[in-house]
Image (cartoon, helix red, strand yellow):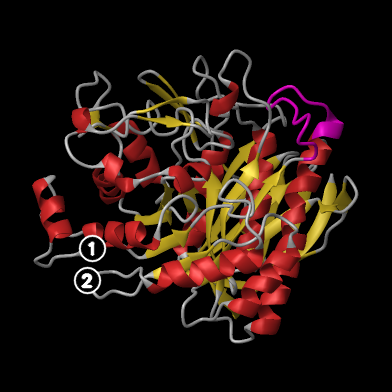
């Protein structure tokens, strides 16, 4: 048993945690959209206009705040005109990035915005800058947002949507340093300036414009963008980072050694270095913090499950992933002064998914439960949260934590990253009057995961946190994640 002292000062508020920090990502990749989110109106699986009811309910339970679509790499080969009109008459294309399968385009603009309205989340479009044009993106935005007397608004009405949709978030391209065009940052910066110039919300609302930022530790890309872009035409730049120690041998999602567990945590904790160094560059060029950082792809990436299409990126999800997700979300809370949105990759059936489906069945993964435990942070104010600590596997802190205050409630989230040692915590709470304490916990062996035969093998349980003489006491088992609420 390891013992740690913590201190939380609820009066020392450092940043606002935008709900969008807990966002998600859905791409036309494998079974994320088809079978995962969308089954068609004629499916025997309960649905609302083709969108799975169980997925909508699961997203609503964790208050998914924003959903990114249609990619990913797919975004820069996606042409929105193919995804409107009668579903049966839509143009069929080939998804050249993910498995070479036929893309029916039955899930398009109308279906995506329908999904967002059902869930109650903000849509975040990834615009086609790679194979598209400024005109194509401009017309898409007009189709979505115009209530005027113009052909594009009339076309939307003809296709079944009378009122325009609300749209705030637009990204310009995806990974344009790689699958989005193999561009240099100087060239991309010029293209971005051109595209954003012709992109606007026809309803007069201001768009939140996200420029394609760096891959992992490409600090030069961030430097060049910050030199060439300004807050007048850029609201944020993106960052993509996957926790992978060896891209040639990514390893199994469920069969792994303690050394593999260590490497996963070490890779995930590199997010702290990336946030510190990229935001440091941004601080030099933008000391007022007017340009945000959007981590719109992050998560663990392993080999696909045996017997599945390698291009579908379907993998299981264990308590190892729950711990790395909790560690990452705590980092986002701590960097919330600059990090304004983050989108886990991906929502359903792909990579570090929230939910896996098999026909009419769904299961919530350990990562889903982490987002459940952390959802109270959405819209809160980050407060000072210090803990004594020691490291595991080199530089990884054994104890990960963050705290926020919202509506008179103090929420503390913690993760014990050690696979074999419990953590006993004594936490002093300053400048906050506590009357009640409640806690929830997710724990298990690092390999523990849910299957369709045992969909609740890993689930949230009631915790044992208590307040004794004004001090918060709780014990975290090895490999666990907890939420404590004080009011």
Secondary structure, magenta segment, majority class: loop
Q: Residue at x 38, y 38 (%)?
A: 58
Query: Magenta segment: does it hold 65?
Result: no
- Quadrant where the N terminus sits is top right
Q: Which residue is mark 2?
A: 203
Q: CA distance from mark 2 to mark 1?
A: 6 Å
Q: Residue at x 70, y 68 (%)?
A: 278
Where is residue 313? Give x, y as percent. Answer: 58, 29
The span picked out in magenta is 245-260
**Numbered circle sitting on residue 282:** none
Where is residue 427? Give x, y as percent. Answer: 71, 63
**Numbered circle sitting on residue 145:** 1
Secondary element type, mark 2: loop
Mark nearer the N terminus (2 vs 1)? 1
Q: Residue at x 30, y 53 (%)?
A: 120
- The reply to whether discs 2 and 1 touch (Cβ–Cβ < 8 Å) is yes
Q: Is residue 104 above or below residue 156?
A: above
């Amino acid at each position: 048993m390891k013992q740690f002292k913590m201190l939380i000062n609820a009066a020392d508020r450092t940043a606002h945690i935008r709900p969008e920090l807990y966002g998600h990502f859905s791409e036309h990749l494998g079974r994320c959209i088809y079978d995962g989110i969308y089954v068609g109106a004629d499916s025997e699986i309960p649905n609302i206009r083709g969108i799975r009811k169980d997925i909508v309910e699961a997203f609503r339970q964790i208050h998914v705040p924003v959903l990114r679509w249609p990619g990913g790499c797919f975004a820069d080969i996606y042409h929105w005109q193919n995804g409107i009109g009668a579903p049966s008459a839509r143009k069929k294309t080939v998804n050249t990035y993910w498995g070479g399968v036929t893309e029916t385009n039955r899930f398009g603009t109308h279906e995506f915005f329908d999904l967002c309205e059902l869930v109650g989340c903000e849509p975040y479009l990834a615009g086609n800058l790679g194979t598209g044009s400024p005109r194509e993106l401009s017309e898409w935005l007009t189709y979505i947002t115009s209530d005027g007397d113009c052909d594009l608004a009339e076309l939307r009405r003809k296709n079944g949507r009378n009122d325009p949709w609300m749209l705030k978030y637009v990204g310009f391209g995806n990974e344009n340093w790689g699958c989005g065009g193999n561009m240099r940052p100087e060239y991309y910066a010029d293209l971005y300036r051109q595209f954003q110039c012709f992109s606007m919300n026809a309803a007069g609302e201001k768009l939140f414009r996200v420029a394609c930022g760096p891959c992992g530790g490409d600090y030069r890309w961030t430097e060049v963008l910050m030199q060439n872009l300004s807050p007048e035409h850029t609201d944020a730049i993106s960052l993509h980072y996957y926790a992978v120690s060896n891209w040639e041998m990514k390893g199994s999602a469920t069969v792994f050694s303690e050394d593999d567990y260590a490497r996963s945590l070490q890779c995930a904790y590199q997010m702290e270095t990336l946030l510190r160094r990229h935001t440091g560059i941004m601080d030099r060029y933008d000391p007022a913090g007017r340009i945000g950082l959007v981590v719109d792809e992050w998560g663990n990436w392993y080999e696909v499950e045996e017997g599945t299409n390698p291009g579908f990126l379907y993998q299981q999800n264990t308590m190892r992933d729950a711990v790395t997700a909790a560690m990452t979300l705590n980092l986002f809370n701590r960097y919330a002064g600059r990090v304004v949105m983050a989108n886990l990759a991906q929502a359903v059936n792909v990579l570090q998914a929230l939910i896996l489906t098999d026909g009419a069945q769904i299961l919530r993964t350990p990562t889903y439960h982490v987002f459940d435990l952390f959802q109270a942070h959405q819209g809160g104010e980050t407060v000072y949260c210090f803990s004594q600590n020691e490291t595991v596997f080199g530089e990884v802190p054994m104890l990960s934590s963050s705290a926020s205050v919202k509506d008179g409630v103090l929420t503390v989230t913690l993760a014990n990253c050690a696979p074999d040692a419990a953590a006993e915590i004594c936490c002093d709470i300053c400048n906050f009057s506590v009357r009640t304490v409640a806690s929830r916990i997710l724990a298990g062996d690092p390999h523990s995961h849910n299957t369709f035969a045992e969909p609740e093998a890993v689930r949230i349980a009631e915790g044992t946190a208590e307040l004794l003489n004004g001090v918060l006491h709780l014990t975290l088992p090895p490999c666990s994640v907890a939420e404590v609420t004080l009011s």
